[in-house]
Amino acid sequence: MKRRSAFCAAAAGLLTAAFIAGIVRGADDGPRATFKQYCFQCHGGGRAMGGMSLEQLLANKTVGDGFARWERVAAALDEHRMPPKGLPQPPDADRQQAVSWVRAELRAFTNQNAGDPGRVTVRRLTSGEYAYAIHDLTGLDLDLGIDASTDSVGGEGFTNFGDVQFMQDASLERYLAAAKKVADHAVIGSGPIEFFHDPGDTGFEMSAIARIKDIYDRYGFRTVSGEGGFPYGLDRYGKVFYVAWRYRHRAALGEPNATLDSLAAREGITGRFARHIWTVVNSTSLGYPSSEAGERWRKLPAPPADARAACDELQKWVTGWPLWLFARGDQAVGGQGDESPLIINEKSLTLAAKKHFTFNRFAFGGRGAARPAGPAKVFLNAAAVNPTAAGKPVIVWRNAVVAYRFPGGPAPDPTPAGDQPPVRGRGQLRPKQPLRAVVSEDTAKQLGFGVARDGATVGPDDFASEPSASFEVPLPQGAIGFEFQADAEIGSSRDQVFRIVITDREDGTSRGIPVRGLIGDPASAGYRKFRDGVLEWTRLLPPNSQFEPTPADKDPIPEPFDSAYNVPEHDEFDTRVKYVRDDRFIYDNILDDAARARVDQAWNDLYASFAYHDNYLDLIAKHFQIDLKGKHIGDLSPADIDALQPEPRKYAKELRKEYDGAMAAQAAARPKRVDDCLRFASLAWRRPLTDAEKQGLRGFYDRTVTTERDPRAAVRAVLARVLVSPAFLYRAESPRLTGDDLASRLSFFLWSSLPDDELRRAAAAGDLEKPEELQRQVRRMLADPKARRLATEFFGQWLGFYHFDQHRGVDTARFPEFTDDVRAGMYDEAVSFFEHIIRKDRPVRDILYADYDFLSKPLAKFYGVDREIKSADRAELIEGANLFHRGGVLRLGAVLAVTSAPLRTSPVKRGDWVLRRILGINLPPPPADAGSIPADDRLFGGLSLREKLEAHKRNATCASCHLRIDPLGFPLERFDATGRWRDKYADGKPIEDRGALADKTEISGVDGLLNYLSAQDEQVRRTLARKLLGYALGRTIQPSDTPLIDRIAAAGSDATFSQFAIEVALSRQFRNRAANSDKVGVQ
Amino acid sequence: MSDSLRSRRQFLRGAGVALALPWLESSPLLAQSAANKPPLRFGCIYFSNGVDPAKWSAKGEGATMELGEAAQPLTPIREDLVWVHGLYNHQALINPSPHMGRMANMLSGAPVSPDPSVIRVGMTMDQVLARQIGGQTAVPSLALGIEPNELRLEDGLSMIYGSNISWSSPTQPATKEIYPARVFDQLTGDGKGRKLDRSILDAVMSDAQSLKPRISNTDGKKLDEYLESVRDIEKRIDRASKEERLEGWRPTLKQPNMPRPAGEIPQHVPDHMKLMLDLTVLAFQMDKTRIATLMLNNDLSQMNFKFIEGVRGALHLDLTHNGKAPELKAMYLKTNQFHMQQFTYFVNRLKQIDEGGQSLLDSSLLMLISNLYDGDAHGADQMPIVLAGRAGGTLKTGRVLDFLDKGNDNRRACSLYLSMMDTMGVKLDKFGDTNQRLPGLFS
């Protein structure tokens, strides 16, 4: 590849020199003579007792070829195990010389080869890496069937060891199926290729509507809740007023150069929205109520006062005003939510000068148990809403009557029409009486029956109000309510427009749906002014920034269709056309250009995802009863359309235009899709494509378009082909690592996945050749959320809690409290603990000695920990965990459970775990005929577990290992087989949590064990370094790695995790490939 | 099978070279079909953790054969089986790792690599068969299992050795399938409608070719696995789409007679095993493959046997290593019997399928085997082996054969494998640790 690192090349040169060193020296040394004389009898001349031929070892070119064997030779000689007793023994001086010589040679070999990259078999993605890579490519977590059953473990104990990763037809079939499945999730429309969680055609449609809603949610707002909806985004009004205010006072605020755009960006709104509002609030030619909004804004306090709170108040007024006008109880203004849509148009604003009102007053003690009836107040709450009208705001209430309601009679109609509230309870209305005859004399006087206030004619049972009034209706004995009726009419000042609410509360609010209405004289200039002002408002400061793209069944549908609820035309529209685009306000006044492009793409995709326009046209045809002779919308010729009647023609023309636009957008996107595929391939393959590869992919696309006759299917085929390619599935590297190779090594090491944009940038810029830049990247990556994968993959496999969420090793019949939630909690506990160490860059000693833990609710309960956990489903950081016996890997539930048998603890398994995984000491396997101990601690036949093991230990062949294993396992006995703390065994016997090592060192309890391990903290760090290096390299550790491991381990007890990761990433073995596999392209 | 037919087969020079051998194309297929006889099927059922040696015995013949307690469930099929006593693998016996060194080599007799950085055993006899005669069917062989690979090391060695009995090369296990639904799909996928797959594979094949010159030689070798897999799938697609079955004999079942299993792994172990056995029967009956192995459990099995009444605990740690506690020994015995029941079920199902006047069992050669004898002691000095089926009339059943005291060179399991491979039509001059056939087994 182009960008070959000078840094890497230099390192490789050093290595070549190093390989020559370490050759076993001349033949006449004393040691050779010693070996010949005393050893060859059994280990030379074709004899290889115990599989060992010293003569052969000496014939090797370097001690490196038989490193482990040479170590054994030195040990056997040094410990006087060889030659065997009874055979001639070399003089001590010769023996010592031989031992020293071997060891010096080994040391020399190690040092001279330090940093040897070693043999690394090309790695296939593990199931974990595959899933993470697909996630990073598509943003989706899909069940693709590439699961842990395709993994194996090797090397230093990790799945990323190339020699245990195989490919066969059956496994390749799985990769092919998985790749096609991923490709099926691709959204192939008018925009860039992306992925969606629903596949196929349905996914295409769903993704389009999801994208549309996403843009509306991110930029827009909605005041009116409507059916099942909630208000959102209203704070954007507050922010935009504030932006305009800051801009107005920019000099005073010390930002003379601020622009509307820059201020808007700071508030998280678009410049376009800010510019629109700036124009509105500074315009002086607007009608009411827009003018009122501008006026209020212009009256905002000037600096040094901050107008933030006042802007929020203004927002509440602006968004609340239409709801107030229509007296709606919407959530945006703290109401209950109103299911009917708020429609502000000429139709809904068509008023009459006179309107009949019926107001029912109930709830005198409720059903049956009537309280003594008393007087009830009625408020005729009126507001003049055309402030420009001249004259008195007077309403004339004509024919005001009251009918009392008494118990009995038929049940009232449960579904009253119009503005009437639902009639609850039983009752029977008595004949109507004039209100005048019912109210007290004082009240009658106050209302002024028959008195004109502004010259309008008033009858004897009529009264005028200016504009509000109220009165008390006395209830006769036994009445359970009454009904008030009247006709409200505009007074002499015909330019007035009134908003009327009749209620029993003084503040104008109501129980349930209010009795409300607007009156105004349609013939008056005042009314027209009012109407135009409101319509202007909906264009400039609308309550909703767009119409719902998926109208609910009560929402209106576009002209010319019948918008009534539950009529066939509405239903058919809902099921066949489904979507309506009316986003003029947000599009014109809010969305930035990029969002406009995206929302256009999304709508064009939505139109293209099903026969949208055909269905739409079909409904139009039905509505106007015209016969299109089954013509597809695309088949309609201009002449066909022109032949239609003017009304249907208008709709057909619009539809055809929209349809042509959508189709053109799809067609225009087609050539770009192949480019998208190439970009996708470059991401998936983790490097720039060669020209040949680009041509190959293009050619494949072209061929597939021809054979499949479907451009979308061809795109899917290309994507599938990219994902089943060896360039994706294998981590093939150039013999001399390129910047991209190194970026991949880093990202697979720390994230188990592909490099991100920043890492790719760094690779392309050659930054990764600079150690300090490499360090910076490692630190950045370790702090990234994706580093949790390192906790899962590396720590999980090293320490044995990998896939613990599927652990089946606990007998849940014996431990029913060990539920799936507890198991999930333990897994989260372990992963979150190591994620914390990695991402917070904690000292590595936290691994053992942390005083914190991560607990979920079910796990805290299981452990009996009485601490508050806020999250319902995630583990939370809890400090001071040692108090309740938690904190550190030795006390992790998952670790304690995997080192137990299903029914009992296993000190041997736990001791073995400490010895191997923490101290990194490998013991030989137990002899095949070692006895066993019962699985169930209820079946020890009187012997305690310890006594049983003691008996086992007396057997000499067993003792040598068990003396090392058991004392490290017993201290954990206070944790049961499910990781819970316990004070006694199931049979009531006291816990035996002490062990003694061969040198009589006694270890008691988990604290004692930690204490013992702290004395060996360098060894612990060495194990971590060894495992981390093995994991990063994907190979077993070899002698030449020792200097690096020693150096990392020597970092001291304050060393943090990033120091370890950086040492590994900067190491020669990590940044190079072995020179001896540097034969390119030999077939 | 006549001598003339045998002479047409290649005489192979040992299993070590088998990897390098090409597929045998359809000449044996033609030959066999001329006889218009059902083809031979080979099935191996493996169970881990051995048996209770005190309860593992057989004596007598045919309908009067008496079986020890552990083998009791085989009684209904005793006339269909051959009890083979005393065979062993020398490389297993001498390997210091009591588990890892004694399982993966069960069907190859090869040494297990003691070096953690090198995965190596030996190609197993079923995979030798697959390579030589697997090309005659849509699926060359099945390697089935119940438990997934355990993702850890044991004795410093990869647990891959404890999870795979079938190895398609010394360094690669055959892909073990544990999902019943995937087996079903593999058997029923017909290669039709896979034109697009074929062209995707063609394209990635060239990816791999163009990748090779840019990577190192060793990496290129690993990529060969990939290339070979692509070729194998392509061959299968091509074969299926051509439908060129030239044989006179036709399988008795065209369409699967069982529904597609659910996508997940069954929670209940016996259900899982039954499904895998049924799928093996289906594969044989539809003649989709003639070679199958099924691991009822992995070595060091964590399978919790609580599904058997009165048993609790994991097969390996709790029940096999039972410390001779009577209660636990009784449970261990039940696990032995449970494994026998699976084999009996399998044999009976094959027996009930008619293939033109004879049963499918008559054309089968089945082997039930564990790598260890005394499970608690990791005993590799011999193995429990039971054969069943008449192998096309070449195997006389209802017998007990004992090789234990015939001398180590005369009781190699690999001798049995050589004989079985002969019967299946694949002749090697040596295999594993021997070049001798097992006398007196096949006629």
Image (cartoon, rainbow, N blue to C red):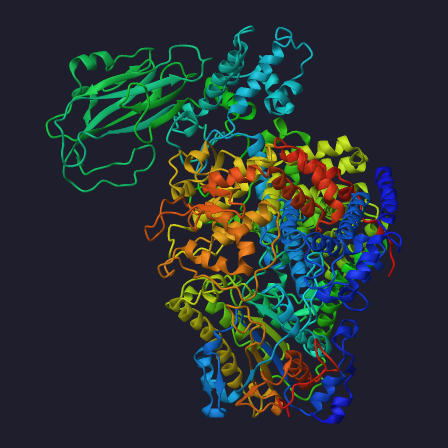
**What is the quadrant of the C terminus of chain A in the image?**
bottom right
The x and y percentages for residue A388 are 47, 13
The x and y percentages for residue A403 are 19, 29
Residue closest to the eye, A462 or B426: B426
**What is the quadrant of the N terminus of chain A in the image?**
top right
The x and y percentages for residue A96 are 76, 49
In-image side of A437 versus A1019 (left or right): left
In-image side of A887 versus A448 (left or right): right
- Give me the residue at 61% from left, 41% from top: A1020
- Give me the residue at 67% from left, 50% from top: A640
- Give me the residue at 40% from left, 71% from top: B330
Tally the numbered discs.
0
Q: Is residue A774 above or below residue B166?
A: above
In-image side of A972 versus A586 (left or right): left
Residue closest to the eye, A1000 or B396: A1000
The x and y percentages for residue A812 are 40, 56
In which quarter of the view is residue B127 placed? Answer: bottom right
Would residue A549 be seen by someone viewing this image from the given angle?
no
